[in-house]
């Protein structure tokens, strides 16, 4: 199940959870009461938005009119007219299913004269008398039959105001047909425009339509090299130029680039055979999100090409835009200081990861804790995983000297004391006389985790300053940090 | 040897900042040999009595103090600096000032952030000694910032305010920044020539309690421990330390330790110096309180028993009255009785039904004053249980008022005595098993679901026993069943934390009805603060704290049954012209006892629960005293003491009446050798264990004390030893102790049971003879009692009461009574009348004059206070005449109108429609009317009859709508719609089981679940009550079977049960073997039920 963090309600549940009675809108505890081993995932608008964009782009390959339905992730209106010459509506439906199966194991497609009927048909298939498991995955409602088809459908399948729906239910009107049978006048007198809108939908009078997607073919730039090249530099040059052209073209169509395919034609023995097709290799570069800026796209392509080992010289390069998405309103101007080009930053960081490995990019973060070695942590930028970094400071014992070296983990030392007070510290075989010891600072805590009980001392010596502690649980001394 | 007094110590009454009970701190201080200990909670004296009593018992000088929050205002208009200032009471004057300051801080500032200003401090500084406080103190804050001059000025200001009764406070918890601050603080002290003093700013008793303190801090900050960071203290040094530990740290400056002793010696105030007195009662000129009381008593005696030396009033009565009055005079308590009498007089003047209960019912004076309704002489109740010279504490009078009007009585008391002299008693809500495990799990980072699961599985009364259960090994433990790893460090810590939270206060609430009144300003005795409820003020002490300081409490309680009876008697007077005086009821009416013997007691006070209904046919009450026993018998005390079945067997002659020891016979004779009442527990202790009356009284207090388990355990050995000395065999001694110990889990005093038995009889009487009025009254008194309105109405209809639906042409907000004839005429001519309760003429009720109950508009769900006001205002202008009339005059929103229509309230306006179409046609019309003139372009409303294009309802839909909108269906019980399917499958009705069921046969039955119970005394057994159209079915579920199908049993509204019938006399139960959910859309899911309360 996916939960909305703000309201802590289930926003979507899997089919298995649904079979156990778990429904969207429930609280997680209610869901768990019905199905104890539910797995909960946070609703991630960014990830879901990205998936919608990606699937929208993929669906465009089947139909030029693709519109993700606002407020209903997982539902798309797709234009289905004009397909008679290429297999008809059923063939379109099958194509859409093929595309959608990448995201869902059992997608459903329905084709109707109105969006409302099409949506209802995805739920009920041929008719509302059918059993749920008999649903056809592609169902086509004959032309002009939408209203008749909808008549036995439950009211839940027509979008309407909840209060209106409850009133209809109380009146004993349980089907779309019963609503449709009311007179417009009666409906308007009781529920006004809200009622009329739903009444029109009940009569399959739906003004909603899929929007035309402007990109009908894969835009591409293809260049043949006069001299075969065995290095990537000339190719990078060509890719950049191609991207500049293609991105401009996309922007003119109001689209952003979701994926770029680079096809290299190799000059090897296979291409030399008579009638044999040229040996081509295609790889795709995908940005973290659809972009309409050249630089981050180019960085992704560069990362792709850098990791590409050429088996033979390249004689032709083709750069194609294979997936697009509607141009996002978040596009910004690099020259505007308030705007940060996250895409470009992503691209740069991606390159670093490609070079240095995942987990190589971290950022420092201060922690609110009494425990010195946990005062700072490194956080991986790419994931939630974390690594404990070296000590940043020992807050209660400010040390005036310029630099402090922290030992992570602290190293065992031998300490000779006068009473409780350290006098000599022996570290790595080196004896250090303590000229002044300040302390102890008694720290303890984390008893619920890996508890600690320590007495810290700040020890000055001729060579600098040390921070040592006595672990009161084990009676061992350790060096935490030193400054020189 | 160094001596040390700890002068700064927080108990758990520093809410969420102190982790030790006052008694624990005292015990630890005694163990450490401290010279003295002060309690200094944050703006609080709530723990002072417990602290003072524990210190007195331990022989430890216990100083009373508090750490006040003091606002220091800067030169500009910036936010004031809130600082801490511990104050110790040197004298009675100092204590009065301290209590007043806490009152001011709490009264004048927003709830939860009390503080006082320096001016207020200066006005109430007499008799107080000030320490400069922790690092959040005014002086310490400035010293920490390095502002030594400002720190000196601040200290000098405090010297001025307290006339040099100030010491600079220093501490060392092993932190360098503290050491730096204390160096500066000592400099300040030396500069000003005032003492400096060592404290440890204690927040818990032992070092290991630090974990509980951390947990409390996390709860205060509302975040898990993992996210607390530096909000937690850096180490665990804030515990009570010995003189040697303190001396080791401060060996270079012993004067700071010596100063603690000097201050402790100055603070000589102890709480037993408080001697509060009651307000003086305004008396007629020249009459003393004793005389006036005697006059009132004589007047009352005449009313109750008639003139002296008559059949009803012989010398016994007058001797008893004289004895009681003499004792009251000797103890100087006449004023107290007059105050209580005055409150009762006010209530009666206002027509508020009221009755005293508790031990006051042992007093003939209370009976004659009208405070109680039980004749103690007739019942042979022991006056000394209420009042005696030996008893050290004040008498305790509990009065029940009709709960709807109780607030009027409370406000009368506030107004009459003034808010400086009257306030309610608080109740400290402490951690118990579930709350402790839930909060501990939350801060330890377990998920909400895990915390819920642990809390559900840890169904234990005390946090300590919950902790033990969490540690249990062998078999699947609670933690494993909750899906946790028992070896996980946090899981192990959980048990420690839960144990540490045992009895720690969580928040403060208002006692159910305890009031204290004083002649002197009450805030000089105990701090008063506003309660969360508007118009209420409470003191910081709870009921157990009052006796030790001599405060007298009067319990002014609310009781739903009195509201019910008050209304019921009013309706009877109005509809039948019959006036009922509860005091004159014939208590021997066998037809009333017939109902009780048949457990026909739905709605009857105290005996309507499932357990009581199961016991009634076995106990077969035939006289008033049987009811007294019945009331006392089904209580956790007798149940846990295993006294119920022996008593029932003996009552039915199935077992010989035996006494475990001959000395017990005179005490237990009238309860057949089984101790049932608290008084008997006391008398048994005296006779069998050789307790003195004083010790027996201690036993009684332990029995009634909310921390009684611990107290009773302490008394256990003493009793066993005493019984052994009297030659009672160890096994018998243990049985006797177990019976007495059972009272620790609530047993009733006999007088209290008698007071309640009176209400049992009265309510059963009213139900038997005036069922329609009783039904209307109980519906109007909701929420109260055990059953939902739907069940009450079903029961009333089974008793022949005609219940009529909600109808806007007739219904008022509350349920009303209609004459049967009125309805007939209304039906005949289709005219609409609002039928208010009328006074009927004529003598005894006849069948035709029995009124019908008209459900009130309050039955309709979703109509709140606003809707009520609008409807009542509209109804005052006259009855509604049409749908449009309702819409226009009531001014309700569409949603409320829709609810009324769906509930059938508009049906009366649609006489032309078939019954099953009325509601929908009405809704159709209401929606039209409610929209009104929707604008110039909207279609105009049609005149004349508008035929609604809506289908008629089916009977099932009608029931579903009834349950959804009102929880009451007059169209048929949900089960009646599925009976035709169930019957051929062998599923039997409640009536069939009751009339034809045979013990041991396997049966199937089904019903609407109206009650689910899992009492703490039932060892995990679950009891269900199912309701069908013919009656109720009791189902018993074993713990194992419940565990297997807990979800189904706990959530399914309609349940089909297969099991074995148990028939014992006329008591029928089904011992369940299998459960199935009945899937039927009949509105069962909307029925209200009594679940696990």
Image (cartoon, coloured by chain):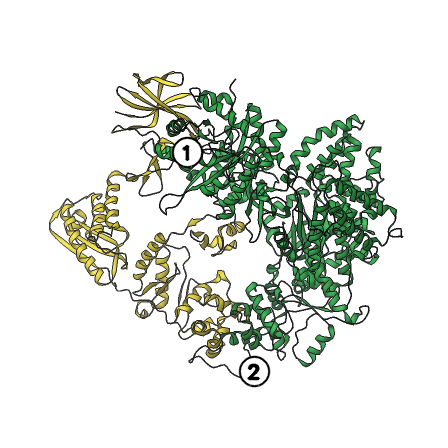
Would residue B485 be seen by someone viewing this image from the given angle?
A: no
* Residue linked to disc 2: B945
Q: Residue at x 46, y 78 (%)?
A: A184
Classify mark 2: helix, strand or loop. Answer: loop
Q: Earlier in the sequence, mark 2 or mark 1?
A: 1
Task: Give the letter of the green chain.
Answer: B
Query: Residue A212 in the image: x percent, y percent?
Result: 29, 67
- Which quarter of the figure has residue B783? bottom right
| Image hue for chain A | yellow
- Name above or below for residue A321 compared with residue B687: below
In the image shown, does A355 or B202 lie closer to the viewer?
B202
* Residue linked to disc 1: B155
Residue at the extreme left: A226
On the same chain, marks 2 and 1? The answer is yes
Residue at mark 1: chain? B
Q: Residue at x 74, y 70 (%)?
A: B839
- Name above or below for residue B1040 compared with residue A196: above
């Amino acid at each position: 199940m996916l939960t909305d963090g703000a309201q802590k309600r289930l926003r979507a549940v899997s089919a298995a959870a649904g079979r156990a009675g778990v429904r969207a809108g429930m609280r997680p505890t209610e869901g768990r009461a019905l199905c104890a081993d539910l797995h909960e995932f946070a609703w991630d608008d960014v990830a879901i938005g990205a998936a919608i964009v990606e699937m929208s782009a993929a669906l465009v390959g089947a139909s030029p009119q693709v519109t993700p339905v606002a407020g209903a992730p997982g539902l798309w209106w797709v234009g289905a007219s004009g397909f008679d010459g290429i297999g008809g509506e059923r063939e379109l439906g099958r194509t859409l299913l093929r595309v959608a199966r990448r995201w869902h194991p059992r997608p459903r497609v329905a084709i109707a004269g109105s969006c409302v009927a099409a949506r209802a048909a995805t739920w009920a298939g041929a008719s509302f008398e059918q059993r749920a498991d008999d649903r056809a995955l592609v169902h086509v409602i004959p032309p002009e039959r939408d209203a008749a088809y909808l008549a036995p459908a439950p009211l839940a399948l027509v979008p309407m105001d909840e209060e209106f729906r409850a009133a209809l239910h109380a009146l004993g009107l349980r089907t779309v047909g019963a609503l449709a049978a009311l007179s417009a006048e009666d409906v308007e007198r009781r529920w006004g425009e809200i009622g009329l809108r739903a009444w029109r939908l009940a009569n399959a009078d739906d003004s909603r339509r899929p929007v035309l997607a402007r990109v009908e073919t894969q835009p591409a730039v293809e260049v043949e090299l006069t001299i075969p090249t065995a290095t990537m530099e000339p190719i990078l040059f060509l890719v950049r130029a191609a991207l500049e052209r293609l991105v401009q073209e996309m922007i003119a169509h109001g689209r952003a680039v979701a994926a770029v395919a680079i096809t290299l034609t190799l000059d090897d023995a296979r291409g030399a055979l008579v009638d044999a097709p040229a040996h081509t290799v295609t790889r795709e570069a995908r940005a973290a999100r659809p972009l309409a800026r050249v630089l981050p796209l180019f960085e992704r392509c560069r990362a792709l090409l850098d990791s590409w080992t050429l088996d033979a010289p390249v004689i032709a390069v083709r750069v194609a835009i294979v997936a697009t998405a509607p141009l996002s309103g978040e596009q910004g101007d690099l020259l505007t200081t308030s705007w940060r080009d996250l895409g470009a930053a992503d691209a740069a960081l991606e390159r670093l990861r490609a070079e240095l490995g995942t987990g190589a990019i971290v950022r420092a973060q201060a922690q609110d804790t009494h425990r010195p070695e946990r005062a700072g942590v490194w956080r991986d930028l790419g994931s939630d995983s974390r690594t404990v970094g070296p000590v940043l400071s020992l807050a209660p014992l400010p040390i005036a000297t310029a630099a402090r070296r922290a030992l992570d983990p602290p190293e065992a030392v031998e300490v000779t004391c006068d009473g409780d007070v350290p006098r000599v510290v022996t570290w790595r075989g080196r004896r250090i006389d303590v000229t002044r010891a300040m302390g102890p600072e008694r720290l303890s805590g984390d008893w619920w985790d890996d508890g600690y009980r320590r007495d810290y001392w700040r020890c000055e010596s001729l060579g600098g300053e040390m921070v040592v502690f006595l672990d009161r649980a084990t009676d061992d001394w350790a060096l935490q940090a030193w400054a020189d | 040897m160094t001596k040390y007094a700890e002068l700064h110590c927080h108990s758990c009454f520093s809410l969420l900042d102190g982790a030790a009970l006052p008694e624990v701190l005292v015990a630890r201080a005694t163990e450490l040999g401290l010279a003295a200990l002060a309690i200094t909670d944050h703006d609080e004296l709530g723990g002072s009595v417990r602290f003072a009593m524990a210190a007195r018992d331990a022989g430890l000088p216990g100083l009373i103090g508090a750490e006040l929050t003091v606002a220091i205002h800067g030169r500009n208009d910036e936010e004031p600096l809130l600082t801490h200032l511990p104050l110790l009471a040197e004298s009675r004057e100092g204590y009065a000032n301290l209590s007043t300051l806490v009152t001011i801080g709490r009264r004048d500032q927003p709830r939860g952030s009390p503080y006082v200003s320096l001016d207020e401090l200066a006005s109430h500084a007499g008799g107080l000694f000030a320490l400069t406080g922790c690092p959040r103190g005014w002086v310490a804050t400035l010293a920490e910032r390095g502002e030594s001059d400002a720190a000196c000025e601040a200290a000098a200001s405090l010297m001025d305010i307290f006339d040099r009764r100030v010491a600079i406070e220093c501490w060392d918890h092993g932190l360098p920044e503290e050491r730096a601050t204390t160096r500066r603080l000592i400099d300040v002290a030396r500069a000003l020539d005032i003492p400096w003093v060592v404290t440890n700013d204690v927040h818990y008793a032992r070092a290991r309690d630090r974990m509980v303190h951390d947990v409390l801090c996390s709860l205060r900050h509302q975040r898990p421990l993992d996210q607390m960071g530096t909000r937690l203290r850096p180490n665990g040094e804030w515990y009570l330390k010995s003189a040697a530990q303190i001396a080791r740290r401060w060996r270079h400056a012993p004067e700071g330790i010596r100063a603690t002793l000097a201050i402790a010696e100055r603070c000589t105030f102890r709480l037993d110096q408080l001697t509060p007195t009651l307000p003086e009662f305004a008396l007629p000129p020249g009459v003393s309180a004793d005389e006036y009381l005697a006059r009132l008593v004589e007047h009352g005696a005449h009313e109750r028993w008639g003139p002296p030396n008559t059949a009803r009033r012989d010398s016994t009565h007058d001797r008893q009255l004289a004895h009681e009055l003499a004792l009251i005079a000797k103890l100087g308590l006449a004023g107290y009785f007059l105050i209580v009498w005055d409150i009762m007089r006010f209530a009666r003047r206002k027509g508020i039904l009221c009755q005293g209960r508790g031990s006051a019912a042992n007093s003939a004076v209370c009976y004659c004053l009208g405070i109680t309704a039980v004749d103690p002489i007739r019942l042979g109740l022991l006056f000394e249980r209420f009042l005696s010279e030996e008893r050290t504490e004040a008498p305790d009078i509990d009065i029940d008022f009709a709960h709807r009007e109780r607030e009027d009585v409370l406000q009368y008391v506030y107004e009459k005595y003034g808010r400086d002299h009257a306030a309610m008693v608080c109740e400290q809500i402490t951690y118990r098993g579930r709350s402790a495990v839930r909060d501990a799990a939350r801060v330890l980072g377990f998920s909400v679901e895990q915390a819920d699961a642990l809390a559900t599985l840890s169904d234990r009364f005390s946090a300590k026993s919950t902790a033990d259960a969490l540690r249990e090994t062998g078999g699947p433990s609670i933690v494993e069943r909750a899906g946790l790893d028992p070896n996980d460090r946090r899981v192990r810590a959980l048990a420690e934390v839960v144990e540490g939270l045992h009895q720690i206060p969580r928040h403060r609430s208002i006692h159910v009805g305890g009031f204290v009144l004083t002649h002197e300003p009450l805030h000089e005795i105990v701090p008063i603060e506003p309660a969360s409820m508007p118009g209420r003020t409470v003191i910081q002490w709870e009921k157990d704290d009052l006796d030790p300081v001599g405060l007298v409490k009067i319990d002014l309680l609310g009781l739903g049954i009195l509201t019910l009876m008050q209304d019921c008697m009013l309706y009877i007077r109005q509809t039948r012209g019959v006036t009922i005086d509860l005091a004159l009821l014939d208590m021997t009416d066998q037809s009333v006892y017939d109902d009780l013997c048949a457990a026909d007691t739905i709605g009857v006070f105290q005996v309507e629960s499932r357990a009581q209904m199961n016991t009634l046919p076995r106990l077969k009450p035939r006289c008033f005293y049987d009811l007294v026993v019945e009331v006392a018998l089904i209580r956790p005390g007798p149940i846990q003491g295993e006294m119920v079945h022996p008593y029932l067997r003996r009552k039915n002659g199935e077992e010989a009446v035996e006494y475990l020891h001959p000395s017990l016979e005179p005490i237990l004779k009238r309860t057949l050798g089984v101790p049932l009442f608290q008084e008997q527990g006391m008398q048994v202790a005296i006779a069998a264990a050789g307790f003195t009356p004083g010790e027996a009284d201690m036993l009684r207090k332990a029995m009634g004390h909310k921390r009684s388990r611990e107290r009773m355990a302490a008394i256990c050995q003493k009793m066993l030893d005493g019984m052994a000395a009297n030659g009672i065999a160890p096994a018998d001694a243990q049985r006797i102790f177990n019976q007495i110990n059972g009272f620790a889990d609530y047993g009733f005093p006999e007088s209290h049971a008698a007071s309640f038995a009176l209400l049992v009889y009265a309510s059963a009487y009213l139900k038997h003879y005036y069922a329609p009025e009783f039904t209307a009254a109980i519906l109007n008194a909701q929420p109260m009692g055990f059953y939902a309105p739907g069940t009450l109405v079903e029961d009333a209809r089974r008793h022949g009461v005609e219940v009529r639906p909600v109808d806007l042409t007739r219904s008022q907000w509350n349920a009303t009574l209609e004459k049967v004839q009125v309805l007939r005429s209304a039906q005949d001519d289709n005219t609409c009348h609002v039928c208010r309760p009328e006074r009927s003429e004529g003598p005894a009720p006849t069948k035709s004059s029995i009124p019908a109950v008209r459900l009130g508009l309050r039955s309709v769900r979703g109509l709140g206070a606003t809707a009520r006001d609008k409807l009542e205002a509209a109804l005052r202008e006259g009855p509604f005449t049409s749908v449009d009339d309702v819409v226009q005059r009531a001014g309700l929103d569409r949603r409320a109108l829709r609810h009324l229509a769906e509930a059938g309230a508009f049906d009366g306006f649609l006489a032309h429609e078939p019954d099953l179409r009325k509601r929908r046609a009405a809704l159709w019309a209401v929606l039209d009317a409610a929209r009104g003139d929707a604008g110039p372009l909207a279609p105009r409303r049609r005149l004349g009859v508008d035929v609604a294009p809506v289908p008629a309802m089916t009977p099932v839909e009608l029931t579903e709508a009834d349950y959804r909108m009102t929880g009451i269906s007059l169209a048929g019980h949900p089960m009646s719609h599925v009976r035709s399917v169930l019957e051929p499958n062998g599923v039997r009705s409640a009536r069939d089981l009751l009339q034809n069921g045979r013990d041991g046969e396997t049966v199937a039955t089904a019903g609407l679940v109206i009650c689910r119970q899992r009492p703490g005394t039932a060892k995990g057994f679950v009891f269900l009550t199912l309701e069908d159209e013919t009656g109720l079915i009791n189902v018993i579920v074993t713990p194992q079977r419940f565990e297997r199908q807990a979800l189904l049993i706990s959530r399914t509204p309609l349940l089909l049960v297969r099991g074995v019938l148990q028939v014992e006399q006329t008591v029928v139960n089904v011992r369940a073997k299998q459960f199935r959910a009945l899937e039927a859309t009949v509105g069962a899911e909307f029925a209200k039920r009594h679940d696990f309360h």
